[in-house]
Amino acid sequence: MKTYRIQSKIKVHDGIVGATYLLSVILAFTVNIQWLYLAGAVAVLQISSAFTGFCPVYFVLNKMMPEETPEPAKPEVL
């Protein structure tokens, strides 16, 4: 179960980053070339995360999809 959760986080991360790159390029062609700064910022974050181990996308995903599932509540015994 843990491997599935890690694989799904990786897929969600790749989807978010890929969509950000694609959106940046589309907006650069249609609106303004300065939207490419967004792609540059994402690239800098990806490169820095290799050294620091901190990725904002994984930070949010870890909050939304925790590794451990909470145990079910046990009924009260009187």
Image: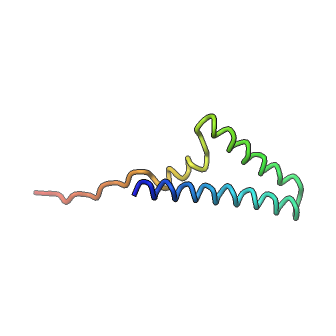
Q: Please state the horizontal and vertical placement of residue 33, each as a whole percent of the image.
A: 89, 55
Give the residue displayed 52% in from the left and 59% down from the top. Answer: 8
Q: Please state the horizontal and vertical placement of residue 27, each as a whole percent of the image.
A: 83, 61
Q: Please state the horizontal and vertical placement of residue 78, each as a whole percent of the image.
A: 10, 57
Query: In terms of depth relative to the viewer, which is nearer, 54 or 47?
Result: 47
Give the residue displayed 77% in from the left and 51% down from the top. Answer: 39
Give the residue displayed 73% in from the left and 42% down from the top. Answer: 44
Q: Please state the horizontal and vertical placement of residue 2, each as a whole percent of the image.
A: 41, 54
Q: Is residue 60 left or right of residue 71?
A: right
Q: Is residue 35 left or right of residue 65?
A: right
Query: In terms of depth relative to the viewer, which is nearer, 8 or 73?
Result: 8
Residue at the outermost top position: 51
Give the residue displayed 64% in from the left and 60% down from the top. Answer: 15
Q: How many marks?
A: 0
Task: Using the rendered view, name the quadrant where residue 3 is placed.
Answer: bottom left
Colour scheme shown: rainbow
Q: Quadrant of the N terminus?
A: bottom left
Q: Is residue 3 left or right of residue 73?
A: right
